[in-house]
Amino acid sequence: MLKQQASSQNGAVSQNNNQKVSEMIDNYRQAKGNDEETAVNLRQAILQTMKDNPHLLEQRDNVTFLAHEIKAEEIAELNWDSPDHMVEFSDSLYQTRFKNDEFAQQLRQHATILLRRALYHFEEEEENLEKMFRLMRLVPTYLVDQNEELSRLRYRANAYEIRRVRRSRRSLYGYLFLQIILVLLVFPFLFINAENGRLQNQVEQLADVEIGDEGYQLLSYSEGVYWAVITAASIGYGDITPTTTTGRIIAGTLGTMGVITVGILAGLVLDWITPRQIP
């Protein structure tokens, strides 16, 4: 019920805005050539209303007015709330259902200039380049090829992506190197000393408690490495198992770390090492 009421209210607001813009367009056409000051004020009011209500671009008369009467620079120089708002309106121009009509070229020019202005905002700061890259992937290829500035921004976005991939690769290699050190050196050492009782005794002395585990086992370094690799890979043959409380804690930690590592690598390795491309 509430959804129906909200939908009904939105429809009423949309209809009121359409009627309001239609009246202003009619008044503008009457004032044009007779009262330039009134015509200029009406142009600004129409633009402001369309800017705040992109759905108005679904009406043919509104789009016709925008294509024939408004210069692209006028739209770009409006007081936009944010670059995201500019991109949203630009996308509405690209996606208008009248884009194949005779004034499609003017609409594309409006959208391109507005999008370019929005992208400039993202280009100024390094942390916004990711957003600029994603937006550039949405721009039709033929528009980028035809516009020198958009081509430059595409090059800048692709250069950012190459740097991002290089940083990600370094992080990935560092993470893998750390995992190798842990699995081949640290965890085997801890597990061997836990199972032969040395680490267990140290824990009991430091904590001033007596764990009381029995059944210590003597393992070689090669057996410790074998156990660590099998545990980290979540295989767990069971031929070497922890017999002490400390050893079980170490085994649980390594097993959990192995599962997390495999999950992370499976989900991110392709994105980390493969650069995305802007067509």
Image (cartoon, grey):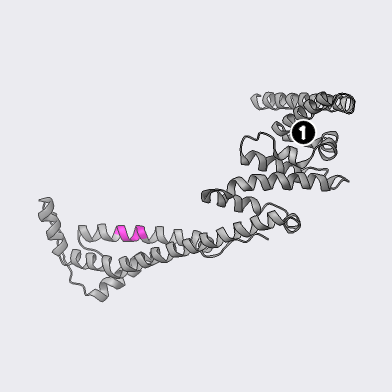
Q: Relative to the observer, which residue lies in front, 77 or 238?
A: 77
Which residue shows up at 66% across the image and 45% down it?
117
Q: Is residue 79 above or below residue 30?
A: below
Could you tell whether 271 is left or right of 94 in the image? left
* Mark 1, secondary structure of its residue: helix
Q: Is residue 168 above or below residue 117?
A: below
Disc 1 packing (10 Å; few <14; some 14–19; many ≥20)? many
Q: Does residue 229 show up?
A: yes
In the rendered image, residue 219 lying in the magenta stretch gets the answer: no
Q: Quadrant of residue 223?
A: bottom left
**What amino acid is at disc 1?**
Leu
Q: Position of residue 78 (x, y in %)?
A: 69, 35
Residue at the disc numbered 1: 56
Q: Quadrant of residue 96?
A: top right
Instruction: Point out the stretch of residues depicted in magenta.
Output: 252-257
Which residue shows up at 64% across the image and 38% down it?
85
Which residue shows up at 50% across the image and 59% down it?
268
Which residue shows up at 80% across the image and 28% down it?
40
Could you tell whether 96 is left or right of 178 in the image? right
Q: Position of residue 8 (x, y in %)?
A: 72, 25
Q: Is residue 180 above or below residue 6?
A: below
Q: Position of residue 241 (x, y in %)?
A: 26, 66
**Quadrant where the C terminus is found in the figure:** bottom right
